[in-house]
Amino acid sequence: MADDTDRSLEDQQKELERSIAAARRDLPELHTGECMDCGEEASNLRESVCTPCRNLIEANRLRYARV
Ligand SMILES: [Zn+2]
């Protein structure tokens, strides 16, 4: 029984790692510049949007997707 649980957790971990690797592959490179959302100078822009703004956008997207 414990073996089944261990295997399941192992499978989940592998699936998670696969998902993270796939997501990373699709992400554009980080670059420096002015965020087109908040206007702040940042070194962590991705497609011209800084990390805090991306997080906000993502949070809003998830919130609206649930409605
Ligand atoms: Zn920003």
Image: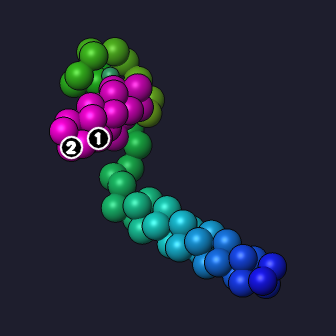
Given the image, on which type of amino acid does mark 2 rest? Ala
In depth, the one of 59 and 21 nearer the eye is 59
Q: Residue at coordinates 33% horizontally, 52% vertically from top-left? A: 28
Residue 22 belongs to magenta span: no
Q: Residue 12 falls in which quadrant of the image? A: bottom right
Name the chief secondary structure element in magenta.
helix
- Amino acid of disc 1: Leu
Percent of width and height locating residue 67: 18, 39
- Quadrant of the rendered structure where residue 51 is? top left
Q: Which residues are magenta?
A: 45-67
Q: Is residue 47 left or right of residue 41?
A: left
Q: Which residue corresponds to mark 1? A: 62
Compared with residue 43, is residue 15 higher up or lower down, i.e. above or below?
below
Work out whether residue 63 or residue 55 is closer to the camera in this orientation and state it: 63
Q: Residue furthest front?
A: 1
- Would you name the residue on which mark 2 appears? 65
Q: Please state the quadrant of the image where ligand 1 appears.
A: top left
Q: Position of residue 15 (x, y in %)?
A: 53, 73
